[in-house]
Amino acid sequence: MIDFKKGYIIKKCDNIEPLKEIQNYLCKLLHKHFDFYHDDPFTSLNQLHKFAPNLNATQLNEKRVGLIEDFNNEIDCSEMIFSAFETIITQFLGPDILAQKKSNVVIQMPNDPNPSEIHRDAPSHSPYEIVLWVPMVDCFKTKAMHVLDHQKSNVLYDFLAKNDDWANFEKEATAQSEYVPVNFGEALIFSTTVLHGSHINKENETRVSLNLRYKNIFSPSGLKNQLQYFKVLKTSDLLKIGSELQFKKIDYNLQKNKKEID
Amino acid sequence: MNSYYSCLDTLLIAPQAEQHDLIKRMAYNNNGKIVFYGAEEYFVARSQPFILNKLKRTPNLNGVIFFTIDQFCYGEKFNTELMLNIVKIGLSIHFARENISVLNLKDLKIKYVEFISYYHCKKSEQNFVNEYYFL
């Protein structure tokens, strides 16, 4: 049984190869979109801000958008991340799994003034989903994410519900949150109910990370349209047998009713 | 060029023009065009009693495009019967908002588990939202 009382854990992958493949592919795209080349993937990613200097926020964003589109069009990231972390994902969700169709790629250069404000993904996302935050480089201190555990997140949301005071909520959440160092080859796995975010990256390295979500096929969905947002990743034989029987029964009843009418 | 029947969602609070746009795009992406428009009567839209006969009466159709799969989820159970009846008269079924197509009976059997899971999860979520947010 996974100890998930905090609402988040850091887990090492079962298989590094899919992560290396994603990392190499990302580098290829970075070289194309940011117009540079370096043969070491860690240098390409960590030093991206040096290879692509003098970009204003709009130019940087345009490049990011183009890169994310190419990335999702050309590789099946959710399948690859799943194969890297299959044991833990299956322990969380069982054998019948939906995966987010498109992966988010986040590039946070040093001193980028637009970090991700503290927030939680539920309730627009299902509280039964897990988020895998997978860095493509080693992340530490301000280059890493900061997270509040499940209990602290709940206490703060109770405070917000009672006082309707977002400014103090945010201040308190930021003060209580902890940086979570995560290395390449590991994932930060967290519940959609815990508060998380990032600060301005004050380290001298660029952070490149992916995030994507998985849920059990029959757990309640969030407010997002499940068929638009997720795809079926794995189904067990038991589920196939069950749904086949259900389908046959409906078809049989239809045929029976039709005969009776005829 | 394929010919599709367009079936709007009567129960959705969304401008019909938006529904038409997405449905038209879905037809275009499936190498076709909309040749007829329709929608269920508001008071019976949950069970969709009219669409099958409309499809049978409309000649030279290749398929029907619904705005959303939710049109099969408004009733007490997922409306598999209607889907089965449509594919059994040789028409494909498409959902514009979800960008999902059911091409034939075999395809429906494959996608069925995804549809019932969607229905189940959506209903559970509605119950959760109702209990949690509208106490």
Image: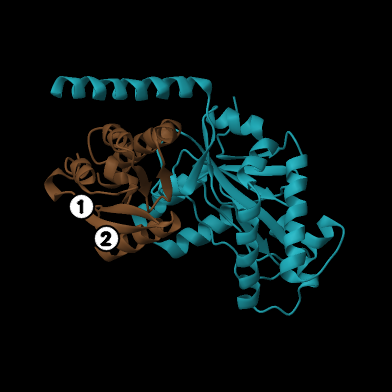
Chain colours: A cyan, B brown
Asked whether, in this view, residue A159 is left or right of residue A37, the answer is: left
Compared to residue B82, the image places residue A70 above or below, namely below
Q: Are marks 1 and 2 in contact (CB under 8 Å)?
A: no
**Callout 1: helix, strand or loop?**
strand
Q: Earlier in the sequence, mark 1 or mark 2?
A: 2
What secondary structure is found at the residue carrying circle 2?
loop
In the rendered image, residues at marks 1 and 2 fall on the same chain: yes
Query: As rendered, which of A100 and A179 lies closer to the eye?
Result: A100
Residue kind at label 2, given as amino acid type: Ala
**Callout 1 crowding tier (Cα within 10 Å): few <14, some 14–19, many ≥20:** some
Which residue is pictured at 60% across the width and 50% down the height? A211
**What is the three-letter code of the residue carrying label 1?**
Ala
Query: Toward which corner of the image does residue A85 lie, by quadrant?
Result: top right
Left or right placement of residue A175 versus residue A187 in this view: left
A105 and B37: which one is in front? B37
Residue highlighted by disc 1: B39
Where residue A92 sits in the image (x, y, percent)? Answer: 56, 31
In which quadrant will I find the N terminus of chain A? top right
User: Looking at the image, which residue is at 25% across and 22% down?
Assistant: A255
- Return the chain for callout 2: B
Q: Residue A77 placed where, x, y %?
A: 64, 47
Structural crowding at the residue carrying mark 2, measured as other residues with C-alpha within 10 Å and reported as few (<14), some (14–19) or many (≥20): few
Query: Height in image: A53 above or below A240?
Result: below
Q: Is residue A253 above or below residue A180?
A: above
Residue B18 tag number: none
Rendered location of residue A95, percent (x, y) = 55, 27
Q: Nearer the viewer, residue A118 or A109?
A: A109
- Foreground mark, 1 or 2, reads 1
Instruction: Say which mark, if any, is on residue B14.
Output: 2
Image coordinates of residue A54 in percent, x first then y, are 73, 80
Q: Identify which residue, A5 or B75, lies in the foreground.
A: B75
